[in-house]
Structure formats: structure tokens, C-alpha cells
Amino acid sequence: MSKPSPASAAPGADGADDVAGVVLTASRLLVAISARSLASIEESLTLPQFRMLVVLDSRGPMNISRLGEHLDVIPSTAMRMVDRLVAAGMLEREASPASRRETLVHLTGAGRRTVGRATDRRRREIARVVERMPAEARANLVEALRAFNEAGDEPRADDGRPAEW
């Protein structure tokens, strides 16, 4: 009789731990690719700052509280990040058209170009990795990652911009 795998031996296990381990390894690869792509475009930008730019690029202008929620940081941390990115010319603040008491943060042209260049470089490097995979594995990866991204509520990277952009 064969020994059950750890995932199947656990009560109610559905292999989620095995999947989490594989995804964790993949995330290390993707973080390394992201760091290299960012370093080649903008050396002074940290990955958390770049993530802030990406959130604003994909979701549009927002206030500090909402931005902090998307980044899972407290508003004061988000504010410090915004201050640095405003000083770097990547972000701007403006009064909300809906409420003069609320300030919205949005990308500048330089911020949008930085996101675009780093994303293009990252896409090319990811494509090189994916090209080395067997065709069947690539097809399965697309389906699995679409479900993963949807479960994580991450907007598609290749979606068109909102009409106001």
C-alpha cells in the first residue's frame, strides 16, 4: 500500500498547501523579474512605490485611504509614499471634484511612462520564461492564473484604460 501524500493525509485537504508552495516559488521568480525590470527603468523607485503607481494606473485616481486599502498599508504610510512620489514627479494631488475636502492622487505623465516601460520590460522577460514551457503547460497556466487573479481581485494587465484616461 502506498503512503498518502501530506496534502491528501490532512483532513479536508484539497491540495491547497501544495498549490500555495508552487505559487510561492513562482512569486519569488516574478518578484525577481519585477525588481530587475524596475531597476533597469528607475533605480530609485522601490517595489512598494512601484506597486502604488501600478494600482493608480490600473484603478485610476483615488484618495489616500482607499489607496492604503489597496496596498494594505495604513493611511500615514500611504501618505509618506505619496509624498516621495510627488517629489519624484510621478504623482500629483488634486482636490476631488465631488468634495473639495477630499484630495485625490493620480499619476503624472512621468509616472504613467515609468509603469509602461517597466511593465513592457517585465512582459518581455516573462515571455522568455513562458516560451521555455511545454505548450500544454502554458495552456493550463493561462487558465489557472486567470482564476488566481480573479480570486485575488487583480485587474487584467492588458485591459484598456477607463474612458477618462
Image (tube, rainbow, N blue to C red):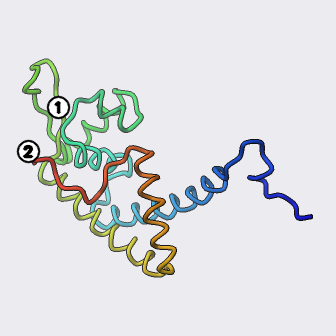
Q: Nearer the viewer, residue 94 or 21?
A: 21
Q: Nearer the viewer, residue 6 or 53?
A: 6
Residue 128, relative to residue 73: is it above or below?
below
Task: Label 1, secondary structure: give it.
Answer: strand
Residue 59, relative to residue 136: is it above or below?
above
Which residue carries the number 2 mark?
Answer: 164
Report whether 33 appears left or right of 40.
right
Q: Residue furthest front?
A: 1
Image location (x, y in percent) of residue 164? 8, 44
**Among the 4 quarters of the image, the one containing residue 121:** bottom left
**Among the 4 quarters of the image, the one containing residue 62:** top left
Say which residue appears at 22% left-offset and 61% top-offset.
116
Nearest to the eye among marks 1 and 2: give it: 2
Residue 30, relative to residue 65: is it above or below?
below
Image location (x, y in percent) of residue 40? 31, 67
Q: Which mark is residue 33?
A: none
